[in-house]
Image (cartoon, rainbow, N blue to C red):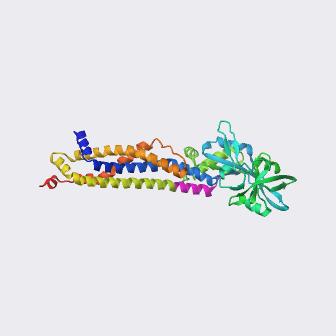
Amino acid sequence: MLLRVLKSSLLNRPKAIVLLLLSITMGAAVATAFLGIYGEISHKMALELRSYGANILVEPAAAEDGADLDEADLKKIKTVFWKYNITGFAPYLFGIVDLEAGGKKARGVVTGTWFGKELEVEGEEPSIQGVRVIAPWWDVAGQWPQAADEAIVGVSLARRLGLKAGSEIVAGKNGRSRRFKISGVVTTGGYEEEQLFAPLPTVQGLLAKEGRISRVLVSALTVPMDDFGSRDPATMTKLEYEKWYCTAYVTSVAKNVEEVVAGSRAKPIWQIASAEGSLLKKFNMVMILLTSLALAASAIAVSTSLMASMAERQHEVALMKTLGADRLQVVTIFFGEILIISLIGGVLGYLLGDQLAELVSRIVFSSKIKSPFWLFPTAILAAFAVAAAGSVVPLRRALLIKPVQVLKG
């Protein structure tokens, strides 16, 4: 009997049913799209933010001048627990040298580094590491160094010494000297504009520090910091330490790196880490707020549609009560209709929302996203929630209908 009543009710009111289905579908679609973006785009945003600079500094633990690190330990960075979160790193070796170019002399900093070195680690996929990975905003007028005797020079230093791409410069220290051909002039907007950058092995030979480096900058994907992530690990219990170590806080990733680089001290670059954490938190809050507002707007649309439908069906409800239907039976009939429409709307909303999320990802990040497995049941639940919230007021109105007043005359 109930199924026959539901079938008759759904088929006899096509316009009202389509309008109700459209409201629920749109709510489920927007919720699916926003939640899909929330789950995937936050990760892509973190990757985008990594292009604004490294967030971990690794330096010698010893405080005395001349302390350095072993270049051989760099491969171990790609073997730590959070190795897949480390998107890149670059070693640096600094030295004060005498510079001479075109008859002009000056004291300056020569920096040895990797520009784009292929790093092979046993058991891991080869990866490209160096400045071009962790500092893609560097603007080089010319070319990156390709040979051992090529270098790039900061724009400020180049201006003082009259250097440009194709010029030559001699760097010397303690009786050792090396002639470099300038392949490009780099603009960074920072202190790097006063330095001469050359391949790491060449600078190590010039400074008589073969196999040594001054520091390492590491770029890693991390989660926003909270009060727990900011705690001192020394004050944690064993269980707390395991939770902290297994969460991708910038502090725990830094601890990973510190453990494999002998004699090092790894610490977050808080200006970058804090800004990233704050931005990701705000992004997540915005996505949750937009999802909530979309569902609320959909529930209001559902409520409006049901109220209009209820005004047309008040004689039907009054007649059911006259024939002996109690409150539970009236609620069962109307909720049965809502559940059927919600199920259909949830499925359609999921399919539409999935396409919408992919469209947004392609337009904003030029990449595809993969819908998580939990998104489909979430879309169905969102449709049910919208329908239930929107039907409260209309259903209450239906239960208050008095047959004597409605059927009079």
| 249 sits to left or right of 65 | left
Any part of residue 380 in sight: no
Indicate whether 93 appears above or below 370: below
Q: What stretch of residues is rendered in magenta?
A: 267-281
Q: Quadrant of the N terminus?
A: top left
Residue 379 at what x, y percent from top left?
Answer: 40, 45
Residue 159 at what x, y percent from top left?
Answer: 76, 63
Residue 97 at what x, y percent from top left?
Answer: 81, 57
Picture residue at 84% right of the left edge, 62% below the top: 104
| 7 sits to left or right of 219 | left
Residue 273 appears in which quarter of the rendering? Answer: bottom right
Q: Is residue 277 magenta?
A: yes
Indicate whether 342 appears above or below 63: above
Residue at the outermost left position? 409
| 406 sits to left or right of 28 | left
Residue 162 at what x, y percent from top left?
Answer: 79, 62
Q: Quadrant of the C terminus?
A: bottom left
Residue at the outermost right position? 175
Q: Is residue 121 magenta?
A: no
